[in-house]
Image: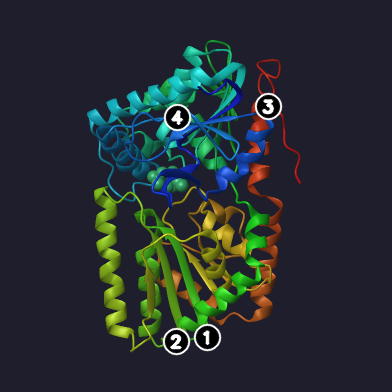
């Protein structure tokens, strides 16, 4: 049994993944994500507890400790994985919140599973939160938890952070359960978004659809509570990425990668989860056309695309995989030579060391999502370029575009525009790329993920300051 805590993190995923150990038993391995490293120090300082789904459908999991962190697993049945995770979360909410890039599906039984699973997460939080504790709920899979928690435990201080974009009112209005979702989020004291546009969309919807009074970023509830909706752009663990990129072994691996690619003049790189929001197809098409148009040759340039497998049982993701396979086949079949494919396509996930080596090996990083909450890959690339070299082509529809203004920004729907930006970045001289990279590094170095977590928790503590216990802050190193 886990002891009760004054800081509780509630997220769909636990910060660990299941692994098979060499002795045949099953263990846990820390997931590579930035959220874990951001919350790690504050979790330790406050003896925090993290509630989440470990993936899969394993049963009889007890709360456990991993490297000093207290973890509470939430179990899902196979049917719930299908209806709550693949269905409502990733085939309804995900496309609606990403500009309807794919058509969202609406199924009442998916919604019922979403309510049920949100109740289960809430019940765990109710159990482990100390009197007056701070509970920080994360992301679109758990939007009903704040209200459920508020009803069960009015003593708590509740924060919610949405990692993905919050859509314009016109798109959100399609959701048959729009009012329930808005009311679910209003259970929090502070609702955090990536961008101020998302916070404004939310406040406007609350005014229109729920009828509460609002003023700027504040929402006034009839029970005399005030909810704040504001932007807290997320970041990465910049220092640890740079440190990794500086390692000799990573430099050696970067050299090896370029050699394996045939030492072309320029290496283009794309790194994404294989997701239809990421605009992978458009950028690979743009690259193929640049070769076809004669701007460069496969001896001059190669495109390395890493696409990590994701949500593979959701139909739209299967369709996308087939489309990318076909396009890569086409481009390489038409334009490649023996031992020189135009696109080096890797459908796999790699450890951080390998990613740092790829970032170091790449001259031009191409990030072209149709819509993205932030896009941490763009920031990782910048963090690894301590040599001030390298160029970034970045979609203006990624949250990161607001901060990384010196990137070559593109409209991801405009293939000619992507081609022009890729070509400019390809031809840019060292003076130009250095100037841009230096400015972007300044931003990424000062605003890292620890600062992000600190600013959210501080803002949460500022709301109703006399209420509940304060979370012990963690001073920057
Ligand atoms: O960007 C939103 C997000 O849910 C991240 O938190 C997560 O790392 C990624 O998408 C992959 O999500 P999933 O849990 O579906 O594999």
Label at residue 205: 4
The kind of secondary structure element at disc 1 is loop
Vertical relation: 452 (above or below) 209? below
Q: Which residue is mark 3?
A: 471
Observer-side mark, 1 or 3, equals: 3
Q: Which residue is mark 1?
A: 265
Q: Are marks 2 and 1 in contact (CB under 8 Å)?
A: yes
Counting other residues with Cα less than 10 Å from the Cα at mark 2, is it few (<14), some (14-19), or many (20 or more)?
some
Spatial CA distance of label 4 from label 1 is 51 Å
Indicate the position of residue 147 as horizontal and vertical percent values. 46, 20
- Corner quadrant of residue 196: top right
Residue 422 horizontal side relative to residue 224, left or right: left
Q: Which residue is mark 2?
A: 296
Label count reads 4
Q: Earlier in the sequence, mark 4 or mark 1?
A: 4
Q: Earlier in the sequence, mark 4 or mark 3?
A: 4
Identity of the residue furthest to the front in this view: 23
Counting other residues with Cα less than 10 Å from the Cα at mark 4, is it few (<14), some (14-19), or many (20 or more)?
many
């Amino acid at each position: 049994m886990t002891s009760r805590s004054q800081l509780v993190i509630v997220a769909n995923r636990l910060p660990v993944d299941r692994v098979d150990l060499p002795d045949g038993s099953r263990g846990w391995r820390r997931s590579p994500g930035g959220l874990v490293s951001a919350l790690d120090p504050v979790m330790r300082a406050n003896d925090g507890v993290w509630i989440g789904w470990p993936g899969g459908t394993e049963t009889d999991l007890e709360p456990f400790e991993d490297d000093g962190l207290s973890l509470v697993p939430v179990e899902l049945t196979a049917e719930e994985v299908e209806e709550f995770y693949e269905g409502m979360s990733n085939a309804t909410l995900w496309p609606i919140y990403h500009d309807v890039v794919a058509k969202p599906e609406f199924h009442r039984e998916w919604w019922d599973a979403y309510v049920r699973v949100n109740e289960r997460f809430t019940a765990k939080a109710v159990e482990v939160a100390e009197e007056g504790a701070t509970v920080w709920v994360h992301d679109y899979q758990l939007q009903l938890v704040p209200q459920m928690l508020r009803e069960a435990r009015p003593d708590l201080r509740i924060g919610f952070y949405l990692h993905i974009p919050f859509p314009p009112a016109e798109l959100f209005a399609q959701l048959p359960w729009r009012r329930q979702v808005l009311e679910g989020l209003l259970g929090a004291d502070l609702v955090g978004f990536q961008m101020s546009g998302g916070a404004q969309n939310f406040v406007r919807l609350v005014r229109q659809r729920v009828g509460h009074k609002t003023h700027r970023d504040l929402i006034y509830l009839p029970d005399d509570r005030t909810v704040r909706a504001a932007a807290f752009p997320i970041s990465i663990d910049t220092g640890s990425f740079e440190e990794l990129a500086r390692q000799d072994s990573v430099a050696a691996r970067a050299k090896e990668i370029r050699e394996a690619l045939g030492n072309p003049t320029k290496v283009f790189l794309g790194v994404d989860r294989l997701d239809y929001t990421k605009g992978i197809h458009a950028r690979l098409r743009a690259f193929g056309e640049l070769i076809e148009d004669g701007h460069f040759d496969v001896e001059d340039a190669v495109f390395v695309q890493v696409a990590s497998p994701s949500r593979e049982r959701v139909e739209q993701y299967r369709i996308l995989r087939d489309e990318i396979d076909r396009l890569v086949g086409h481009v390489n079949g038409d334009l490649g030579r023996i031992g020189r494919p135009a696109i080096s396509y890797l459908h796999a996930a790699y450890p951080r060391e390998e990613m740092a080596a790829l970032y170091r090996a790449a001259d031009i990083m191409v990030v072209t999502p149709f819509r993205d909450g932030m896009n941490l890959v763009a920031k990782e690339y910048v963090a690894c370029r301590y040599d001030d070299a390298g160029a970034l082509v970045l979609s203006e529809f990624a949250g990161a575009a607001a901060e990384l203004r010196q990137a070559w920004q593109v409209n991801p729907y405009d293939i000619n525009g992507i081609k022009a930006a890729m070509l400019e970045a390809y031809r840019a001289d060292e003076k130009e790329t250095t100037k841009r990279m230096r400015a972007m590094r300044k931003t990424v170095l000062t605003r890292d993920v620890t600062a992000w977590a600190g600013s959210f928790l501080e803002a949460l503590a500022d709301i109703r300051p006399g209420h509940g216990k304060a979370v012990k802050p963690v001073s920057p190193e």
